[in-house]
Image: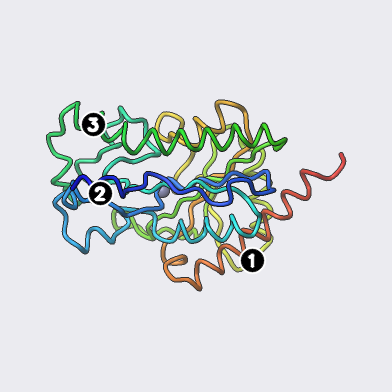
Amino acid sequence: MQQETRQHHPFNVLNRHGRSDLVIICDHASKVIPREYNDLGLSGSDLERHIAWDIGAQGVAELLAAAFDAPAVICGTSRLVIDCNRHPTDPAAMPVKSDGVVIPGNQALTQSDRDDRVRRFFHPYHDMIEDVIGERFREGHHPLILSIHSMTPEMNGKFRPWEISLSSNEQRKVSELMLGLLRRRRDITVGDNQPYNLDPAEDYSTPVHALARHLPYIQVEFRQDQVGTPAGIKKWADIFTEALTDLIERSQAPA
Ligand SMILES: [Zn+2]
């Protein structure tokens, strides 16, 4: 078990010294539950569902990292072990229940159990994001944080019509530009703070890594029925790349 514990990687960094100003992060990329947690007592089918990870998000993140030559920090641990986009003191960081499914391995956690997950998985991931952002500044970049998520097509019996959606708070200049660029396409339905806005009381990553230092950000949700296959991932990475390329060109154009 010791050996297996050591093999778990709390994050993976791609393109660390890429040329783009973008820094891509992917909090819910992974469905990996380190072996010693015994699948948190869940069955195989639940471990494949959106409750464990953001289906398709890592694939989109990888294609965007390649398209823009941008660094990407990819989380390596399932959000059922610890949700790296929640404040570690939030009960939702180690959910006892998710979309109606009871998580047996998260019942009756002690403070020491919680601290252990925060130390082993949460901090290494977020510390690496900080390291990469710090390096970007030193290398002369002005980082734009791109936080990539995916959402289930249906929640609590309600279908979500948005194939792609941006989440923002009141600091939303870049999000508004990007919404406009995405909406030039008539064949897609773009959500603006639907189903999720960006809430610093709930979200952790974008508020801490971007808002706290006044960095521009885009937080995006792709709908999982759209990015559930390699072809879908490619299609949506291309749609996003086209809009983001225009956004970057406009921001670099002389005023
Ligand atoms: Zn997510």
The residue carrying mark 2 is 34
Q: Give the left or right position of residue 36, taking residue 216 as reference.
A: left
Measured from the top left, where is residue 110 in percent x and y?
A: 15, 29
Quadrant where the C terminus sits is: top right
Q: CA distance from mark 1 to mark 3?
A: 46 Å
Measure the alpha-carbon separation of dots 2 and 3: 15 Å
Other residues around mark 1 within 10 Å, as few (<14) / some (14–19) / many (≥20): few
- Disc 1 residue type? Arg
Q: Residue 83 at x, y = what percent?
A: 34, 41
Residue located 50% across and 48% down the image: 13
Q: Which mark is residue 186?
A: 1
Task: From the viewer's perspective, tell me whether residue 169 is left or right of residue 87.
Answer: right
Question: Which label belongs to residue 112?
Answer: none
Q: Quadrant of residue 234?
A: bottom right
Q: Dot 3 corresponds to which residue? A: 114
Is 140 placed above or below 52 here? above
Kindly state the secondary structure of the residue where label 3 is placed. helix
What secondary structure is found at the residue carrying circle 1? loop
Residue 194 visible? The answer is no
Neighbour tally class for label 2: few under 14, some 14-19, many 20 plus, Cα within 10 Å: many
Query: In this image, 209 relative to 51: left or right?
Result: right
Disc 2 CB within 8 Å of nearest ligand 1 atom = no
Q: Secondary structure at mark 2?
A: loop
